[in-house]
Image (cartoon, rainbow, N blue to C red):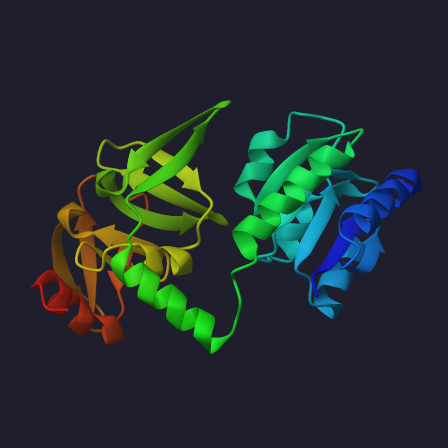
């Protein structure tokens, strides 16, 4: 059963969302209603939640603060009376952004998108094997990116490296441009061609063609030098050095 949480500081808006959810998804279970950032964090810590419906402006601040204090990987449908938060919502784990007053058909579209994107993400061993088998033969060959109000794609081979910084994940191209993407590095590891890309550190996955050189570093680690230059220092940990060198040598 899908469990969801509503974060909304206006009671009427909450009651209307609850009513629409009971009509559109009577099989979903409402686990709680939070009116503030503090209440939301408490409910997240106490419950297993599959989906969040979150108003952006709350009585005690902006809801993005929730995810700064309590990082979660839960799909989110954002609701708001304002449209200036669209790009920031996209950077969080959002699946849709609905402007108030919310119509049933808009909520239905968002729920369908949630189900389409997340219903297969089962934790069963059978699913994990199916997913691994699929990714073995079907590597991600392009990424959708957003620039202002427009969308475009870039080919995966254009990526010099992927890295995480300040709670965001970036795709950095050989051209020097970088874009925020909605994939964690853990997700990317399973999507990318292992002959070309390697998880060189906790916060960086590199394209072999972007690594200019590596040198020995204190603590039996390796320091990597990139072209284009990486925004932060990248060190290969001691227990990853052997695998990294084999990968550089074409041994998988």
Farthest residue in the right direction? 12
Q: Can residue 9 be seen from the camera position used here?
A: no
Q: Nearer the viewer, residue 118 or 59?
A: 118
Q: Using the rendered image of the protein, determine whether residue 31 is visible from the camera's viewpoint.
A: yes
For residue 82, above or below residue 242: above
Is residue 181 placed above or below 72 in the rendered structure? above
Farthest residue, direction top: 149
**Quadrant in the picture for the N terminus:** bottom right
Q: How many numbered discs, if any?
A: 0
Horizontal relation, residue 77 to residue 198: left or right: right
Q: Position of residue 23 (x, y in %)?
A: 82, 47
Taking 62 as reference, is 34 left or right? right
Q: Position of residue 42 (x, y in %)?
A: 77, 62
User: Residue drawn 60% across and 31% down?
Assistant: 86
Q: Residue furthest left?
A: 249
- Is 197 on the left-hand or right-hand side of 144? left
| Image x and y of residue 118, in percent | 55, 55
- Picture quarter containing residue 200? bottom left
Viewer-proximal residue among 76 and 174 = 76
Q: Nearer the viewer, residue 7 or 242?
A: 7
Residue at left offset 66%, top offset 60%? 50
Residue 125: % across, % down? 46, 77
Q: Quadrant of the C terminus?
A: bottom left
């Amino acid at each position: 059963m899908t469990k969801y949480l509503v974060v909304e500081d206006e009671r009427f808006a909450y009651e209307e969302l609850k009513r629409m959810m009971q009509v559109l998804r009577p099989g979903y279970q409402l686990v709680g209603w939070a009116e503030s950032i503090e209440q939301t964090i408490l409910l997240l810590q106490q419950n297993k939640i599959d989906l969040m419906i979150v108003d952006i402006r709350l009585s005690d601040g902006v809801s993005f603060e929730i995810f700064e204090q309590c990082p979660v990987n839960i799909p989110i449908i954002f609701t708001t009376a304002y449209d200036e938060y669209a790009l920031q919502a996209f950077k969080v784990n959002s699946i849709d952004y609905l402007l108030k007053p919310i119509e049933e058909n808009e909520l239905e579209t968002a729920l369908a998108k949630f189900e389409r994107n997340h219903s297969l993400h089962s934790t069963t061993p059978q699913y994990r094997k199916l997913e691994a088998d699929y990714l073995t033969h079907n590597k991600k060959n392009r990424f959708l990116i957003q620039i202002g109000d427009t969308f475009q794609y870039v080919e995966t081979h254009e990526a010099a490296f992927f890295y995480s910084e300040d709670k965001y994940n970036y795709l950095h191209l050989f051209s020097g441009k970088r874009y925020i993407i909605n994939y964690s590095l853990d997700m990317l590891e399973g999507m990318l061609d292992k002959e070309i890309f390697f998880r060189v550190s906790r916060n960086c996955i590199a394209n072999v063609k972007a690594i200019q050189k590596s040198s020995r570093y204190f603590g039996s680690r390796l320091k990597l030098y990139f072209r284009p230059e990486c925004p932060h220092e990248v060190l290969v940990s001691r227990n990853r050095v052997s695998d990294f060198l084999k990968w550089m040598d074409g041994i998988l």
